[in-house]
Structure formats: C-alpha cells, structure tokens
Amino acid sequence: MAVSLAEPTVLAAAKDTLFPDIETSPDQYAFTETQFTQPTWGGWTIPQALRDRLALYNTIRLAAGEPDLLGVGVPAAEVLNGHAATTPVTVIEAKGHNTNPAAADVARGITQAHAHLPEVNLGYVAAPAASITDTARAQARNHNVGIIAVDDTESARVIEPARVTRVT
C-alpha cells in the first residue's frame, strides 16, 4: 500500500475528490502539470490507468512556480466564502511518499499552495492522511489553504476547506 501513495496517486485522488464530474461537466476543467507525464516517479512505475486519471496535461506556470494541478470551476467540496467567486481557479499541490506515507512533506505543500493564492482563488494541499498532523491543519487554516487527506488510491476527503482568497 505504501507505494500506492506516491505523489501521482495522491494527486489523482485529490483531482477525483474536487472534480468528480469533470468528464461530463461543461463548467469544469483541470490540467495536470507535465512533470506527471513521465513513466516513473522515484523509481515507481506509474500505471497507465493512473496516468489516464491525471490527464489532461499541460505546462502550468504561475509566478510562484508550477502547481501540480490547475482546475477551473466550483469544486465538489465545501469552500469557505464560496459565493465570492462564480468560476474559481484552483491549484492543488500534491505531496506523497513512495515508501512511507507518513513522511510526506505536508508543510511544504501548504507553503507552495499558499504562494499561488495571489493568482488563483483556491489552494489545496493533498497528502496521505497518515502525514497530516494537527499542526499542519492549523498551518493550512492560517494560510487559507485546504487539505485533502488521501486514504488510499481511490479514496480522499477534504479535512480542511479552502477559502476563496480573491474574486474573479
């Protein structure tokens, strides 16, 4: 199970959680950063089914760097101050670990997601549930960043809602 929570797996679960109807919704779309098109991640072979879940791919460049995923449309999760943006732009920074899910660097993901907030409306970090501490949850709340806890390859849940930070 540990390998299944590598960063690409965490990102796919987060995408499915925030945008579960993306294939049929004309009001939503998402792009995964092209770094996830590589065939392996830290020596782990990325299964084709997972690569399909992460598609569409595109280069994403924001002032603070390249987020792992950029989505447009209202997420299927609670959003604080959600009325402030009719078509929010969302970033997800994924943190995983190939061998020890509890070792994912959640604090770094929160910092990365927060750095993108001047250009987007919502920021999330997605990480294995085992790596999310009370301290990380407090840090995320203080930075208006949501947290998506990934339980396994197919299951994730929002444990800290994101807050809309700018109006589009």
Image: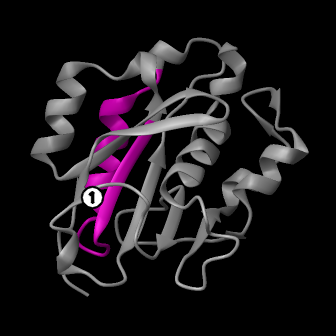
- Give left or right: position of 148 versus 110: right
- Give left or right: position of 122 versus 67: left
Residue 117 in magenta?
yes
Which of the 4 image quadrants contains residue 130? Answer: top left
Q: As displayed, is residue 104 above or below residue 112?
A: above
On-image quarter of the N terminus = top right
Residue 11 in picture, x, y percent from top left: 58, 45
Residue 159 in picture, x, y percent from top left: 31, 36
* Residue at x-position 52% and y-position 84%: 27
Residue lying at the far right of the rendered structure: 48
Residue for badge 1: 115
Name the secondary structure under disc 1: helix
On-image quarter of the C terminus = bottom left
Residue 136 in magenta?
no
Q: As displayed, is residue 110 above or below residue 27?
A: above
Of residues 16 and 10, the one drawn nearer to the viewer in this rendering: 16
* Residue at x-position 22% and y-position 31%: 137
Residue 100 in picture, x, y percent from top left: 57, 12
Residue interval drawn in magenta: 104-126
Disc 1 residue type? Ala
* Residue at x-position 49% and y-position 62%: 66
Q: As displayed, is residue 75 above or below residue 53?
A: below
Residue 28 in picture, x, y percent from top left: 54, 77
Which of the 4 image quadrants contains residue 7? Answer: top right
